[in-house]
Amino acid sequence: MVRIEKIKIKNNIIECVLFPEDNKDGFILKYNPETREKDYQLPKGYEHCDVHVTMACVYLRNNYKKNLPESKVVIWY
């Protein structure tokens, strides 16, 4: 599960804050859904969270041409 907050799009770049699972500290993700380039820095202790970034990017890529909400919770199993 990843919580995506403060979703904004500017010049085809999506910028948001990701909160993996129950973590209280988020980190910034910048993502270009056209080229699939991502820019983010996992905080110390978050090394296991690459899958959370990937799942957030999948959601953002599949929905960016629609009206993205300001926040979204993405759950997978």
Image (tube, rainbow, N blue to C red):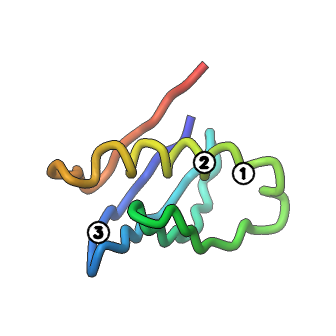
In the image, taking residue 71 as reference, residue 67 lies left or right, namely: left
Residue 72 sits above or below residue 77 on the image: below
Residue at (53% x, 71% y) in the render: 28
Q: Is residue 12 left or right of residue 20?
A: left
Q: Is residue 6 above or below residue 77?
A: below
Q: Nearer the viewer, residue 71 or 14?
A: 14
Which residue is disc 1 drawn over? 50
Q: CA distance from mark 1 to mark 2?
A: 6 Å
* Residue type highlighted by circle 3: Lys
Left or right side of 50 for 69: left
Residue with the most extreme top position:
77
Q: Which residue is mark 3?
A: 8
Q: Nearer the viewer, residue 50 or 3?
A: 50
Instruction: Name the kind of residue labelled 2 in the image.
Output: Thr
- Quarter the C terminus occupies: top right
- Which element type, helix, strand or loop, lies under badge 1? helix
Q: Residues within 10 Å of mark 2 (few under 14, many from 20)?
A: few
In this image, 14 relative to 29: left or right? left
Query: Which of the 4 image quarters holds residue 42?
Result: bottom right
The circle on residue 54 is: 2
Question: Which amino acid, by three-letter code, is at mark 1?
Answer: Asp
> Decide: marks 1, 2 in contact (CB < 8 A)?
yes
Q: Locate residue 1, reporting x and y percent.
A: 57, 34
> What residue do we see at 81% from left, 48% from top?
48
